[in-house]
Image (cartoon, grey):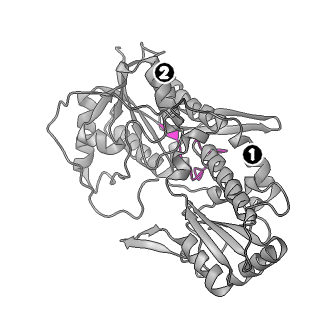
Amino acid sequence: MSARNALYLQSGGMTAVINASACGVIETARRHPSKIGRMLAARHGTLGLLREELFDTGTLGRGELIGMRQTPGGVFGSCRFDLDEPEANPEQYRRLFAVLEAHDIGFLFLNGGNGSMQTALQIARAAEARAWPLQVIGIPKTVDNDIVEADCCPGYGSAIKYLASSVREASIDMASMSSRRGRVFVLEVMGRNAGWLAAGCGLAADGPDAAPQLILVPEVAFDEAAFGSALHRCVERIGWCTVVVAEGVRGADGRPLSQVSSEGRYVQLGGAGAVVSRIVQERFGFKVHCAVTDYLQRSARHLASATDDAQAYAVGAAAVEAAVGGAHCVTTAVQRVSSSPYCWQVGEVALARVANFERRLPESFIRADGLHVTGAFVEWARPLIAGESVPAFIDGLPRYWSPRLAPVPAMLPAHEPRPAGPKAKPSD
């Protein structure tokens, strides 16, 4: 039987190291020419698959792959596009499998978070229902660190390395300034339902009064009185305070402190830091500065964690090895072997156990008052930021790779994907 082609897709929000996973896939596939023919990549993930907008990675040389690995964002492009269920949109699946057939795709690698794992599961089950010979393997990534059945998610270590560094640096600046009113710095980070990123900022606190002094996570309902009391104690003691706020922090009624817009059942969050800042200023009378990290926390490749880069590459490489070994409908996952010394490996988990499930901060990682992390979290998280994976610098700035990708000629009529109806949430 001749080797069949493979297709790689990037999906959902980006990380500083997702392209390391792409390199792991491409380089490992090249070591199995008898099993895998051409290694293709879709432009903008699932949308590119449905549009038949594909690239041939075979034209990429060693130097270009090194440049790719050191570049943030997704070099092939991503999207937030969820597949419908087959019965709701059969035309969507007819198109999908027509593209797969036209390009003789026997292996599909989907690199994303828990929502993307759901997409991978849908494609795998649709292939099984059609008796279509397709092996679907998930490759994890998300700065949110909320994929279940894994110790950590590639992308998270680099994100919290950047966030903790930023908190430490900004807080040194804060401590340098004098104010009669007391000064507060509020930093809003991503974290819709889980506080992993906000918790990661706690790595910066290397002493009793070190920043961040307060951390607000979605797992704990915001208690204004308790927050205000802790804030006052901190400012009275040292004259200033740094507060980290996850975007999904909720009040006692379970509603987010802030939302940008609502479309159907999906609520776009944003502005929780501004809400907390107003409370600090108007109700407690302190001078306040507020910042939102937004894309910065997931694209800071100049401060990527060496551990994170290695894990991102490894889950991509392991996905290919699993596929050529006959695996199907699984995702690779980082598994911790020991914490001291830190040791990890890559395993496999069934997609059905991961798809659309969300891992939240465990109680053991949240301090009893709900306003900071515990030593157990610090011990768990510290290895994830170890080491520096520094890109090349030219003229004082990081030199990132500008892709020169070879498009694969389309073999089918042009097509624009259309979902059957609104989604409850976008892909991760």
Relative vertical location of residue 334 with respect to residue 164 in this rendering, above or below: above
| Outermost left residue | 413
Mark yes or no: residue 426 visible.
yes
Q: Say what amino acid the circle numbered 2 marks.
A: Glu
Residue 209 x %, y %: 83, 64
> In terms of secondary structure, where does tag 2 sit?
helix
Count residues near mark 1 (Cα–Cα under 10 Å), then give few for <14, some for 14-19, many for 20+.
some
Tell me where the magenta segment starts and ends, as one range. Answer: 138-154
Q: CA distance from mark 2 to mark 1?
A: 30 Å
For the point 34% across and 14% down, which residue is it?
2
In this view, the residue in front, 410 or 104, is 410
Q: Amino acid at mark 1?
A: Arg
Camera-side mark, 2 or 1: 1
> Badge 2: few (under 14), some or many (20 or more) residues near its Cα, within 10 Å?
many
Residue 124 figure quarter: top left
Q: Is residue 349 left or right of residue 206?
A: left
